[in-house]
């Protein structure tokens, strides 16, 4: 908290002499999505700390927790404080769905790292997603199991949230497209504390691979119980597993051979820019960043560049984000015409010795391949 307070003071102090642009950050930092939401917040704040010279900008963080009405009330509150050109908006799909009608009414761009595919399928031009949608991520998820591991009978355990149901839908579609059978599919609530019964059913279903599409806490619980039960099926998890905060909940031996899909893995390195981002993030927050933090950092950096070039209204920001591209650290971002900015997915795996995964496969240009 001290590091965060210092960072916010740096941002505010640097802009006090000018008329600052307000950039609200409405994200879940409590509740079942607190790990992911904190990463999203931190990525946005780090980008603000490194705003372009001459751009005065402040960031107000509002915790949206997990209820849709919390996000709506948060947006109403920040709008009462005066005009804003854009908002860093919740990565929780249900909250984004609640915010989208307001964004359209207010002509206010929402920048998010939510994976829920339907956000950009509703014809709302004010949503910009800087993380691969479930349509793309689940294509890579399934393709790795089928093409690289040679598996054809898949079991799926997914969350019953909007995120989980979105992922389950696209896993089923991708499996069918690639000639695999989904022999087991079952959803669980976020408050379930014992996954052993469902994992046992999945492992005895005739499946030759187990796919997980869960939030961070349930993902860690599932991996721990898979190890305890001695389930020998190959496991490919969702992006929550790549988070250092999730991996920290597990012994490296429990992670051995486990793989996951993600947009990136900052702790795995790979470029001088990634190394600098990793060092800057650690210095600011005393923790390791994940793909959510990096995606929100990249997206906020693109927004700040648009603001530095003079955009001050929601309409001007929307037009710029919709038409420009941005060479981020994780990937190159450009809208597909629907607000999806991210078009690459990586597969990473753990060796059982450390909690730092290795990137074993990268999928680019999945937009066409994942089209139904």
Image (tube, rainbow, N blue to C red):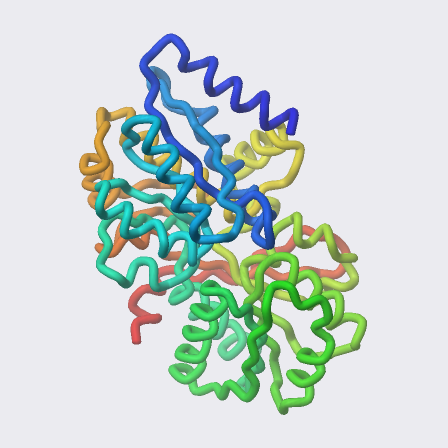
Which residue is most to the bottom? 206
Name which residue lies at 39% across and 36% down. 300
Is 192 placed left or right of 295 in the picture?
right
Instruction: Check the image and report above or below for 113 versus 178.
Output: above
| Residue 371 position in % (x across, y down) | 30, 72
| Residue 221 position in % (x across, y down) | 71, 64
Which residue is most to the top? 17
- State which quadrant residue 175 falls in: bottom left
**Quadrant into which the C terminus falls:** bottom left
| Residue 307 position in % (x across, y down) | 28, 28
Name which residue lies at 73% across and 71% down. 194
Name which residue lies at 59% across and 50% down. 31
Name which residue lies at 46% across and 69% down. 167
Instruction: Check the image and report above or below for 279 versus 266.
Output: above
Is 207 placed left or right of 257 in the picture?
left
- State which quadrant residue 202 falls in: bottom right
| Residue 123 position in % (x across, y down) | 22, 59
Instruction: Check the image and report above or below for 331 versus 48.
Output: below
- State which quadrant residue 224 falls in: bottom right
**Quadrant into which the N terminus falls:** top right
Q: How many marks?
A: 0
């Amino acid at each position: 908290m001290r590091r965060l307070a210092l960072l916010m003071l740096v941002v505010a102090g640097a802009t006090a002499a000018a008329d600052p642009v307000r950039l609200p950050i409405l994200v879940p930092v409590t509740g079942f999505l607190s790990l992911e939401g904190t990463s999203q917040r931190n990525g946005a704040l780090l980008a603000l700390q490194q705003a372009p010279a001459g751009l005065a900008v402040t960031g107000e963080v509002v915790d949206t927790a997990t209820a849709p009405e919390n996000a709506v009330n948060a947006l109403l509150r920040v709008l009462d404080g005066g005009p804003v050109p854009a908002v860093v908006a919740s990565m929780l799909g249900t909250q984004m769905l609640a915010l989208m009608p307001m964004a359209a009414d207010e002509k206010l761009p929402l920048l998010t790292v939510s994976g829920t595919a339907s956000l950009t399928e509703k014809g709302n031009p004010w949503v910009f997603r800087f993380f691969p949608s479930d349509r793309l991520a689940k294509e890579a998820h399934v393709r790795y199991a089928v093409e690289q591991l040679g598996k054809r009978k898949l079991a799926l355990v997914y969350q019953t949230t909007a995120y989980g149901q979105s992922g389950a839908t696209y896993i089923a579609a991708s499996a069918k497209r690639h000639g695999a059978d989904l022999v087991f599919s079952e959803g669980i609530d976020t408050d379930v504390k014992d996954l052993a019964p469902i994992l046992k059913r999945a492992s005895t279903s005739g499946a030759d691979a187990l796919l997980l599409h869960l939030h961070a806490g349930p993902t860690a619980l599932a991996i721990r119980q898979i190890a305890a039960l001695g389930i020998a099926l190959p496991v490919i998890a969702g992006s929550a597993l790549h988070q250092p905060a999730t991996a920290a909940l597990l012994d490296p031996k429990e992670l051995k051979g486990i793989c996951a899909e993600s947009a990136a893995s900052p702790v795995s390195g790979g470029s001088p820019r990634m190394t600098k981002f990793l060092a800057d993030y650690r210095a600011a927050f005393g923790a390791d960043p994940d793909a959510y933090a990096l995606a929100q950092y990249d997206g906020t950096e693109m927004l700040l560049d648009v603001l530095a070039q003079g955009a001050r209204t929601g309409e001007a920001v929307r037009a710029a984000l919709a038409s420009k591209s941005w060479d981020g650290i994780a990937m190159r971002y450009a809208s597909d015409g629907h607000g999806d900015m991210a078009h690459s997915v990586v597969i990473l795996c753990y060796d059982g010795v450390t909690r730092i995964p290795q990137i074993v496969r990268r999928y680019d240009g999945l937009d066409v391949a994942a089209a139904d």
